Image: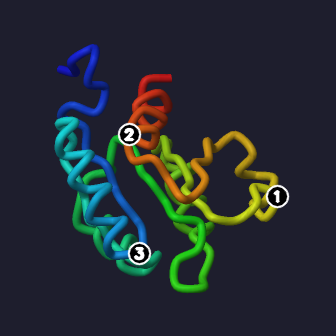
């Protein structure tokens, strides 16, 4: 059961972010919103390993660039499995392939409260 003013309450959220401080802040903010955080993990490989032993998350936050590698393979998998997500990026949105045009983007430097709100919207869309 979700609480109307806390759309992430009791939702399992995957956080994939390679900047440690940002990942930690994001996880804490999501937990404050009542979410159960999976991760944070810093790479596509670690995210895939985490998902291998877990039920699918209710939503995901993916940094576009993870240690110089794009998060696109993970994004494709999440989309194929129906997991709502948002991207965070410091890059111009034009670097994203067209197939991700529908995925909400939060530009860095990010406002963690905005990310939580954006994720809540895509989960309940």
Query: In the rendered image of this protein, does residue 31 appear above or below residue 5?
Result: below
Q: Are marks 1 and 3 in contact (CB under 8 Å)?
A: no
C-alpha distance separating marks 2 and 3: 17 Å
Residue occupying the far top of the picture: 4
Using residue 13 as the reference point, say whether residue 100 is left or right of it: right
Crowding at label 3, few (<14), some or many (≥20) Cα neighbours within 10 Å?
A: some
Using residue 90 as the reference point, say whether residue 50 is left or right of it: left
Residue 25 x/y as whole percent: 28, 59
C-alpha distance separating marks 2 and 1: 24 Å
Q: Identify the residue at horizontal 33%, vertical 75% (top origin).
A: 20
Q: Quadrant of the N terminus?
A: top left
Q: Identify the residue at horizontal 26%, vertical 65% (top origin).
A: 24
Q: Which residue is mark 1?
A: 94
Q: Identify the residue at horizontal 53%, vertical 58% (top origin).
A: 109
Residue 67 x/y as whole percent: 52, 85
Q: Which residue is mark 3?
A: 19
Q: Which residue is mark 2?
A: 113
Q: Nearer the viewer, residue 30 or 36?
A: 30
Query: In the rendered image of this protein, does residue 74 appear above or below residue 55?
Result: below
C-alpha distance separating marks 1 and 3: 22 Å
Q: Nearer the viewer, mark 2 or mark 1?
A: 2
Count of numbered circles on the image: 3
Tell which circle, 2 or 3, labels the residue nearer the N-terminal end: 3
Crowding at label 1, few (<14), some or many (≥20) Cα neighbours within 10 Å?
A: few
Label 1, secondary structure: give it.
helix
Residue 97 x/y as whole percent: 78, 60
Label 2, secondary structure: give it.
helix
């Amino acid at each position: 059961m979700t609480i109307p003013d806390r759309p992430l309450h009791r939702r399992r959220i995957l956080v994939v972010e390679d900047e440690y401080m940002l990942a930690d802040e994001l996880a804490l903010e999501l937990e404050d919103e009542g979410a159960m955080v999976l991760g944070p993990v810093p790479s596509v490989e670690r995210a895939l390993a985490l998902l291998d032993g877990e039920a699918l998350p209710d939503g995901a936050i993916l940094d576009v660039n993870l240690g110089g590698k794009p998060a696109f393979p993970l994004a494709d998998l999440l989309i194929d499995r129906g997991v709502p997500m948002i991207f965070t990026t410091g890059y111009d949105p034009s670097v994203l392939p067209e197939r991700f045009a529908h995925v909400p983007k939060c530009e860095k430097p990010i406002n963690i409260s905005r990310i939580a709100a954006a994720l809540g919207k895509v989960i309940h869309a």
